[in-house]
Image: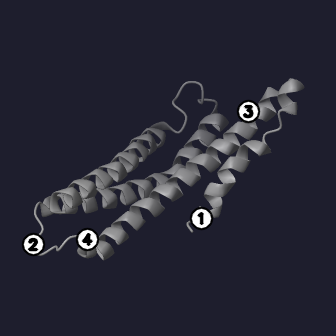
Protein backbone atom coordinates (compact mmCIF):
# COMPACT_ATOMS: atom_id res chain seq x y z
CA UNK A 1 0.00 0.00 0.00
CA UNK A 2 1.31 3.44 -0.91
CA UNK A 3 1.60 6.02 1.82
CA UNK A 4 2.26 9.73 1.60
CA UNK A 5 5.52 11.16 2.90
CA UNK A 6 5.23 12.65 6.38
CA UNK A 7 5.68 16.22 5.14
CA UNK A 8 2.69 15.86 2.82
CA UNK A 9 0.58 14.27 5.57
CA UNK A 10 1.38 17.24 7.75
CA UNK A 11 0.09 19.68 5.14
CA UNK A 12 -3.47 19.07 6.27
CA UNK A 13 -2.39 19.82 9.83
CA UNK A 14 -0.91 23.21 8.97
CA UNK A 15 -4.25 24.93 9.12
CA UNK A 16 -4.88 23.47 12.54
CA UNK A 17 -1.89 25.57 13.68
CA UNK A 18 -3.85 28.74 12.95
CA UNK A 19 -5.47 30.25 15.95
CA UNK A 20 -8.66 31.89 14.82
CA UNK A 21 -8.92 33.43 18.28
CA UNK A 22 -6.46 36.05 17.07
CA UNK A 23 -8.93 37.25 14.43
CA UNK A 24 -11.74 37.33 16.98
CA UNK A 25 -9.61 39.41 19.32
CA UNK A 26 -8.66 41.81 16.55
CA UNK A 27 -4.98 40.82 16.42
CA UNK A 28 -4.69 40.45 12.67
CA UNK A 29 -0.91 40.98 12.67
CA UNK A 30 -0.38 37.75 14.61
CA UNK A 31 -2.82 35.93 12.35
CA UNK A 32 -1.00 37.32 9.30
CA UNK A 33 2.33 36.11 10.69
CA UNK A 34 0.85 32.65 11.12
CA UNK A 35 -0.31 32.69 7.50
CA UNK A 36 3.16 33.72 6.32
CA UNK A 37 4.67 30.86 8.31
CA UNK A 38 2.25 28.41 6.70
CA UNK A 39 2.99 29.82 3.26
CA UNK A 40 6.67 29.08 3.76
CA UNK A 41 5.89 25.52 4.78
CA UNK A 42 3.64 25.05 1.74
CA UNK A 43 6.28 26.36 -0.67
CA UNK A 44 8.92 24.10 0.87
CA UNK A 45 6.63 21.07 0.54
CA UNK A 46 5.91 21.88 -3.11
CA UNK A 47 9.64 22.12 -3.87
CA UNK A 48 10.39 18.82 -2.13
CA UNK A 49 7.45 17.10 -3.79
CA UNK A 50 8.43 18.36 -7.24
CA UNK A 51 12.01 17.17 -6.74
CA UNK A 52 10.81 13.77 -5.55
CA UNK A 53 8.30 13.35 -8.36
CA UNK A 54 10.66 14.48 -11.13
CA UNK A 55 13.53 12.38 -9.84
CA UNK A 56 11.25 9.40 -9.35
CA UNK A 57 9.71 9.72 -12.80
CA UNK A 58 13.15 9.93 -14.35
CA UNK A 59 14.39 6.91 -12.43
CA UNK A 60 11.29 4.84 -13.11
CA UNK A 61 11.38 5.64 -16.80
CA UNK A 62 15.04 4.57 -16.99
CA UNK A 63 14.40 1.36 -15.07
CA UNK A 64 11.06 0.19 -16.42
CA UNK A 65 10.65 1.60 -19.92
CA UNK A 66 12.44 -1.44 -21.29
CA UNK A 67 9.84 -3.67 -19.60
CA UNK A 68 7.00 -1.83 -21.35
CA UNK A 69 8.61 -1.03 -24.70
CA UNK A 70 11.46 -2.73 -26.53
CA UNK A 71 13.75 0.29 -26.84
CA UNK A 72 15.69 -1.25 -29.75
CA UNK A 73 12.63 -1.30 -32.00
CA UNK A 74 10.74 1.58 -30.43
CA UNK A 75 9.46 4.36 -32.64
CA UNK A 76 9.60 8.06 -31.84
CA UNK A 77 12.36 7.76 -29.24
CA UNK A 78 12.57 11.52 -29.31
CA UNK A 79 9.45 11.64 -27.11
CA UNK A 80 11.21 9.58 -24.47
CA UNK A 81 14.29 11.77 -24.70
CA UNK A 82 12.12 14.89 -24.40
CA UNK A 83 10.49 13.51 -21.26
CA UNK A 84 13.92 12.95 -19.71
CA UNK A 85 15.01 16.46 -20.65
CA UNK A 86 11.82 17.90 -19.14
CA UNK A 87 12.34 16.07 -15.86
CA UNK A 88 15.99 17.11 -15.64
CA UNK A 89 14.98 20.73 -16.34
CA UNK A 90 12.34 20.44 -13.61
CA UNK A 91 14.91 19.17 -11.11
CA UNK A 92 17.43 21.87 -12.00
CA UNK A 93 14.83 24.66 -11.92
CA UNK A 94 13.59 23.53 -8.51
CA UNK A 95 17.10 23.24 -7.07
CA UNK A 96 18.10 26.69 -8.34
CA UNK A 97 14.85 28.13 -6.97
CA UNK A 98 15.58 26.61 -3.57
CA UNK A 99 19.13 27.97 -3.73
CA UNK A 100 17.92 31.51 -4.52
CA UNK A 101 15.25 31.61 -1.80
CA UNK A 102 17.63 32.63 1.01
CA UNK A 103 19.00 35.42 -1.20
CA UNK A 104 15.47 36.74 -1.76
CA UNK A 105 14.76 36.59 1.96
CA UNK A 106 18.00 38.42 2.79
CA UNK A 107 17.19 41.05 0.19
CA UNK A 108 13.72 41.52 1.68
CA UNK A 109 15.18 41.83 5.18
CA UNK A 110 17.62 44.47 3.89
CA UNK A 111 14.71 46.32 2.26
CA UNK A 112 12.80 46.29 5.55
CA UNK A 113 15.89 47.43 7.47
CA UNK A 114 16.70 50.34 5.13
CA UNK A 115 13.07 51.39 4.71
CA UNK A 116 12.82 50.70 0.98
CA UNK A 117 10.36 47.81 1.27
CA UNK A 118 7.41 49.95 0.13
CA UNK A 119 9.36 51.45 -2.78
CA UNK A 120 10.84 48.27 -4.24
CA UNK A 121 9.57 44.79 -5.04
CA UNK A 122 10.19 42.61 -1.94
CA UNK A 123 13.07 40.27 -2.69
CA UNK A 124 13.93 42.19 -5.85
CA UNK A 125 15.16 40.27 -8.86
CA UNK A 126 15.61 37.13 -6.79
CA UNK A 127 11.87 36.93 -6.19
CA UNK A 128 11.12 37.32 -9.90
CA UNK A 129 13.67 34.62 -10.77
CA UNK A 130 12.20 32.24 -8.19
CA UNK A 131 8.68 32.69 -9.59
CA UNK A 132 9.90 31.94 -13.12
CA UNK A 133 11.90 28.92 -11.96
CA UNK A 134 8.96 27.53 -9.98
CA UNK A 135 6.67 27.82 -12.98
CA UNK A 136 9.34 26.27 -15.21
CA UNK A 137 9.73 23.37 -12.79
CA UNK A 138 6.03 22.57 -12.73
CA UNK A 139 5.55 23.00 -16.48
CA UNK A 140 8.62 20.86 -17.23
CA UNK A 141 7.43 18.12 -14.91
CA UNK A 142 4.02 18.03 -16.60
CA UNK A 143 5.69 18.14 -20.02
CA UNK A 144 7.75 15.10 -19.08
CA UNK A 145 4.61 13.19 -18.16
CA UNK A 146 2.95 14.13 -21.45
CA UNK A 147 5.99 13.13 -23.53
CA UNK A 148 6.37 9.74 -21.84
CA UNK A 149 2.66 9.02 -22.26
CA UNK A 150 2.92 9.85 -25.96
CA UNK A 151 6.01 7.65 -26.30
CA UNK A 152 4.39 4.68 -24.59
CA UNK A 153 1.15 5.18 -26.52
CA UNK A 154 2.95 5.17 -29.87
CA UNK A 155 4.86 2.01 -29.00
CA UNK A 156 2.26 -0.24 -27.42
Dot 2: element:
loop
On the rendered structure, is 23 left or right of 84? right
Mark 3, residue position: 32
Q: Residues within 10 Å of mark 3 (few under 14, many from 20)?
A: some
Of badges 2 and 3, the one in the foreground is: 2
Mark 1, residue position: 3
Using the image as rendered, state which of residue 121 and residue 75 is in the foreground.
75
| Badge number at residue 73 | 2
Using the image as rendered, state which of residue 115 and residue 54 is in the foreground.
54
| Residue 17 position within the rendered picture, expressed as x and y whole percent measured from the top left | 78, 45
Using the image as rendered, state which of residue 82 and residue 120 is in the foreground.
82
Q: Residues within 10 Å of mark 4 (few under 14, many from 20)?
A: few
Label whose residue precedes the other's in the sequence (2 or 3): 3
| Residue 132 position within the rendered picture, expressed as x and y whole percent measured from the top left | 39, 41
Q: CA distance from mark 1 to mark 3?
A: 32 Å
On the rendered structure, is 7 left or right of 33? left
Is label 3 in contact with label 4 (beta carbons under 8 Å)?
no
Is label 1 in contact with label 3 (beta carbons under 8 Å)?
no
Mark 4, residue position: 68
| Residue 128 position within the rendered picture, expressed as x and y whole percent measured from the top left | 43, 38
Of badges 1 and 3, the one in the foreground is: 1
Tell me: residue 12, above or below residue 21: below
Tell me: residue 8, above or below residue 126: below
Of badges 4 and 1, the one in the foreground is: 4
Q: Residues within 10 Å of mark 1 (few under 14, many from 20)?
A: few
Q: Quadrant of residue 95?
A: bottom left
Amino acid sequence: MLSLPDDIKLNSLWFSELTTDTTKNGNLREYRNQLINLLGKAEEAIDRSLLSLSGGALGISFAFISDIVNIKIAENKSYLFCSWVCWVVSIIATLVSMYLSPFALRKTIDQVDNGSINEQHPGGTYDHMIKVLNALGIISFLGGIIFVIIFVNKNI
